[in-house]
Image: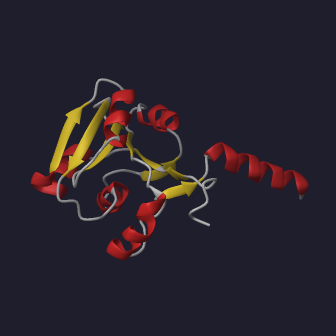
């Protein structure tokens, strides 16, 4: 039951590996005047700014990519969720040779660790609230792949390992 208090929606962040093009210049070109990048002093500041976003502009955290930490602001977003807006850029960016691949990861620490490696960039997205689920499906149709996870990654790992032991 989606309304059960025990069920939590956890964000799934994106890490882009093997950058071959300037991803920030490509994002500027893709989103045009709706794109704005500002630096953040730390990962904690970036997360705080993204998680406290209000209004119609969408905020997406950035880790690495030669920029350390920052926040991308998208005005007049094409989708209801920041993760959908980001995915609308990332899919064609990778398909057109901008990077080797995208991985979908849980946890701010994992995003930071992978994204600060040379040639990578990570995107931190705020979690989707349960009350946004039906509204987003009505407005946008199907959700972007890996929009959210039900539960923490560690809980899922424990479940999978326990299942493996019993088989």
From the top left corner, tell me how far across and down residue 104 is, in percent: 49, 51
Which quadrant of the view contains residue 38?
A: top left
From the top left corner, tell me how far across and down residue 47 is, in percent: 38, 35
From the top left corner, tell me how far across and down residue 23 is, in percent: 26, 46
Furthest residue in direction left, as rendered: 33
State which quarter of the image contains the C terminus: bottom right
In this picture, residue 30 sits left or right of residue 124: left
Q: Residue at x 56, y 63 (%)?
A: 3
Q: Residue at x 39, y 32 (%)?
A: 118
From the top left corner, tell me how far across and down residue 8 is, in percent: 57, 52
In the image, residue 152 sits, relative to residue 31, either above or below, namely above
Furthest residue in direction top, as rendered: 41
Q: Nearer the viewer, residue 75 or 96?
A: 75
State which quarter of the image contains the N terminus: bottom right
In the image, residue 7 sits, relative to residue 13, either above or below, namely below
Which quadrant of the view contains residue 51?
A: top left
Q: How many marks?
A: 0
In this picture, residue 48 sits left or right of residue 34: right
Q: Residue at x 45, y 33 (%)?
A: 112
Furthest residue in direction right, as rendered: 166
In this picture, residue 4 sits left or right of residue 135: right
């Amino acid at each position: 039951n989606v309304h059960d208090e025990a069920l939590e929606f956890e964000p799934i962040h994106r890490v882009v590996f093997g950058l071959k093009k300037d991803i920030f210049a490509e994002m500027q070109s893709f989103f045009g005047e709706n794109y704005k990048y500002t630096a953040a002093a730390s990962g904690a500041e970036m997360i705080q700014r993204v998680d406290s976003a209000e209004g119609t502009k969408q905020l997406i955290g950035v880790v690495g990519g030669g920029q350390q930490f920052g926040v991308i602001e998208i005005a007049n977003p094409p989708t209801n969720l920041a993760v959908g807006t980001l995915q609308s850029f990332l899919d064609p960016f990778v398909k057109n040779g901008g990077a080797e691949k995208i991985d979908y990861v849980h946890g701010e620490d994992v995003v930071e660790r992978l994204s600060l490696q040379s040639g990578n960039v990570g995107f931190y997205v705020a979690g989707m609230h349960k009350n946004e689920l039906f509204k987003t499906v009505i407005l946008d149709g199907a959700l972007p792949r890996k929009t959210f996870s039900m539960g923490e990654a560690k809980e899922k790992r424990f479940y999978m390992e326990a299942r493996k032991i019993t088989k």
